[in-house]
Image: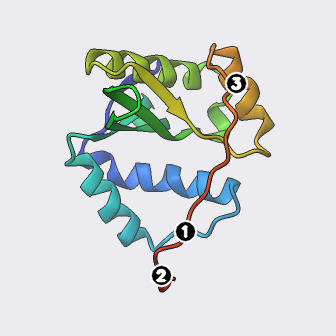
Amino acid sequence: MITYRLATAPDATQIVSLLGEIMHHHGVAPPAPLHLEATVSTILGSQDHLILVAETTGRLVGMCALLFSQSTWSASPVCELQDVLVTRSSRRADIGRGLIEAAEQIAYARGCTRLFLLAEYWNLDAHAFYRSLGLAEKTCLYFERDLRRPLL
């Protein structure tokens, strides 16, 4: 049986392991485990950034992060889902669906009028999964600047 709940401090090590799996999937070298664990601990202490986990028999098999903000566009709270993932060995068991549904309930309870997420353009399995849940595909371009380098 899968339990969906908000993460707590004792979950940090398992969350770091889950994040390592998604970073590997995306071809990204994870930061040092201690640095990543400190980041997770900071998030776990935040009111505006939550981590939702899927657990079975004491083991985390999925997670997603919820980032809450106030939208100037819609003049209402919104929720961005980040790092939606289920371990490879636990996929195709509706765990992802359970995470998204639990995240929607949390966002709705906090007064959010919109829930959104980003998916890599090449991650076609994720696109199909999100569509199957009724999430509407929006088209936009994503721009970023690495602020670890000197600014222009």
N-terminal-most mark, 1 or 3: 3
- Residue highlighted by disc 3: 129
Q: Is mark 3 on a helix, strand or loop?
A: helix
Taking the spot 66% from the left edge, 29% from the top edge, the residue there is: 138
N-terminal-most mark, 1 or 2: 1
In this picture, residue 138 sits left or right of residue 125:
left
Q: Is mark 2 on a helix, strand or loop?
A: loop
In this picture, residue 38 sits left or right of residue 118:
left
- Residue highlighted by disc 2: 151
Which amino acid is tagged 1? Answer: Arg
Given residues 135 and 142, the one toward you in this image is 142
Which amino acid is tagged 2? Answer: Leu
Q: Real-space Cα distance between discs 1 and 3?
A: 29 Å
Taking the spot 65% from the left edge, 41% from the top edge, the residue there is: 119
Q: Do the residues labelled 1 and 2 touch (CB within 8 Å)?
A: yes
Structural crowding at the residue carrying mark 1, measured as other residues with C-alpha within 10 Å and reported as few (<14), some (14–19) or many (≥20):
few
Taking the spot 64% from the left edge, 65% from the top edge, the residue there is: 28
Front of the two marks 2 and 3: 2
**Position of residue 9 measured from the top left corner of the image (x, y, whole percent):** 24, 48
Q: Is mark 1 on a helix, strand or loop?
A: loop
N-terminal-most mark, 2 or 3: 3
